[in-house]
Image (cartoon, rainbow, N blue to C red):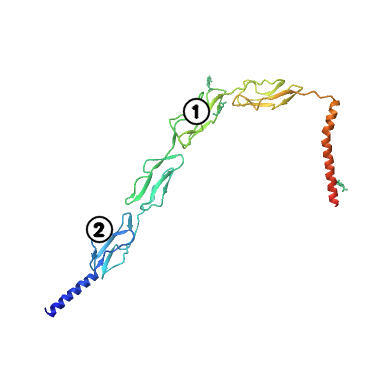
């Protein structure tokens, strides 16, 4: 074998080694990006080779070149930047608020919070920011409806409708004279789809004409005595009143507070027997005076000391 042939072989070998050294291995990109599918199967890249990156689903290119080049076994710097896709704000919901768990970017979720008296209907309870935008339409808020409240005996309410909106009010009235509403006159359609409070009742109120022994009617209502009628009585001479002189007819057809009594005034006892009692009752007042005097005396003493 000639020298020339040997030289050729060795130079070929050298070339192969150099070429091997100038190849690049599989490059790794920046955050949230991957090598484009065209290059994904290759493991080594020749000197001068160019590869491109693309942002992962849900991320969008936010500047920088997407390509890098292999030069002498080294990849150029990855300049591409990928940022999270932003789905933007959802349309506002009437009578509700859109609540974002985090924000409006890829992977974030949102839900609707209806105001009191409104219920969520239609759409989705939770939507997610996906590659193509928000996953679906959000729920909307619909006003709470109440069915008519209960009817009452000898009474009615208005307005009468098939359904009522939240916060709508119905008013009750009794259909006959002298019937009185016991309870709330007005009911309101509440958040729980029912009227509250409970409907009133119509009650017949009539207080009996008072019969008070040894008393005389002085002024006020004459029978029939209806709700809130007032009468005033006084006792005949020689009688003293126990309880209030004026009473009012209440919802239970009772005089309130209870009717007074007229008690016979006790005849004054002869003076002979009273003398002993007065003396005993006078003693405490006497000692009181003495005590007061003692205190005053003491004061003077201390003052002079
Ligand atoms: C309703 O009215 C009728 C006729 O006036 C009466 O007989 C009845 O007792 C009343 N009912 C109530 C609960 O007041
Ligand atoms: C008024 O209503 C209350 C509560 O429903 C009830 O307890 C009471 O007995 C009623 N009064 C009359 C006089 O009907
Ligand atoms: C003792 O006190 C009374 C009233 O506190 C007063 O009127 C009187 O002058 C006093 N006596 C003397 C000696 O200060």
Tell me the SS state at disc 2.
Answer: helix
Indicate which disc residue 157 carries: 1
Q: Nearer the viewer, residue 127 or 297?
A: 297
Q: Is residue 92 visible?
A: no
**Residue name at image x 40 percent, y 46 percent:** 111
* Residue beneath the point at 84% across and 26% down: 273
Labelled disc at residue 107:
none
Q: Which residue lies furthest to the bottom in this view?
A: 3
Above or below, comparing residue 211 to residue 133 in the picture: above
Q: Does the residue labelled 2 lie within 8 Å of ligand 2?
A: no
Please state, as top left, top right, bottom left or bottom right, where the N terminus lies in the image: bottom left
Residue of label 2 = 37
Is residue 59 something one can see in this rendering? yes
Residue drawn at 85 percent across, 29 percent down: 276
Q: Is mark 1 on a helix, strand or loop?
A: strand
Q: Is residue 71 above or below residue 114?
A: below
Q: Residue placed farthest to the left in the image?
A: 1
Q: How far apart are marks 1 and 2 (CA)?
A: 74 Å
Q: In this view, does 244 lie to the left or right of 176?
A: right
Residue 271 placement: quadrant: top right
Residue 259, horizontal then vertical, whole percent:
67, 24
How many marks overall?
A: 2
Whichever of callouts 1 and 2 sits on the residue coming sooner in the sequence is 2
Figure quarter occupied by ligand 2:
top right
50, 65: nearer the viewer = 50
Q: x, y (%) of residue 269? A: 82, 24
Q: Nearer the viewer, mark 1 or mark 2?
A: 2
Within-10-Å neighbours for mark 1: few <14, some 14–19, many 20+:
many
User: Residue 288: horizontal and vertical position, in percent?
Assistant: 82, 39
């Amino acid at each position: 074998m000639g020298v020339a042939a040997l030289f050729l072989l060795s130079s070929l070998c050298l070339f192969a080694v150099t070429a091997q050294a100038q190849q690049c291995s599989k490059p790794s990109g920046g955050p949230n990006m991957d090598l484009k599918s065209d290059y994904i199967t290759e493991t080594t890249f020749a000197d001068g080779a160019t590869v491109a990156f693309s942002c992962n689903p849900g991320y969008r290119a936010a500047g920088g070149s997407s390509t890098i080049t292999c030069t002498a076994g080294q990849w150029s710097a990855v300049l591409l930047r990928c940022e999270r896709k932003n789905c933007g704000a959802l349309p506002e919901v009437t009578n509700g608020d859109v609540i974002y768990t985090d924000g409006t970017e890829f992977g974030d979720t949102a839900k609707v919070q209806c105001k009191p008296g409104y219920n969520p209907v239609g759409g989705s309870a939770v939507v997610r920011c996906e590659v193509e935008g928000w996953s679906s339409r959000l729920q909307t808020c619909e006003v709470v409806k109440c069915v008519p409240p209960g009817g009452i005996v000898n009474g009615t309410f208005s307005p009468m409708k098939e359904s009522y909106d939240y916060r709508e009010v119905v008013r009750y009235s009794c259909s006959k004279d002298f019937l009185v509403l016991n309870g709330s006159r007005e009911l309101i359609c509440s958040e729980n789809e029912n009227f509250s409070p409970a409907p009133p009742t119509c009650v017949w109120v009539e207080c009996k004409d008072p019969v008070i022994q040894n008393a005389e009617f002085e002024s006020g209502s004459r029978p029939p005595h209806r709700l809130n009628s007032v009468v005033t009585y006084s006792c005949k001479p020689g009688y003293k009143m126990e309880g209030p002189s004026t009473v009012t007819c209440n919802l239970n057809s009772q005089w309130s507070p209870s009717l007074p009594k007229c008690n016979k005034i006790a005849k004054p006892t002869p003076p002979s027997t009273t003398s002993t009692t007065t003396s005993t009752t006078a003693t405490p007042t006497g000692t009181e005076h003495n005590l007061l005097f003692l205190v005053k005396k003491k004061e003077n003493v201390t003052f002079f000391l």
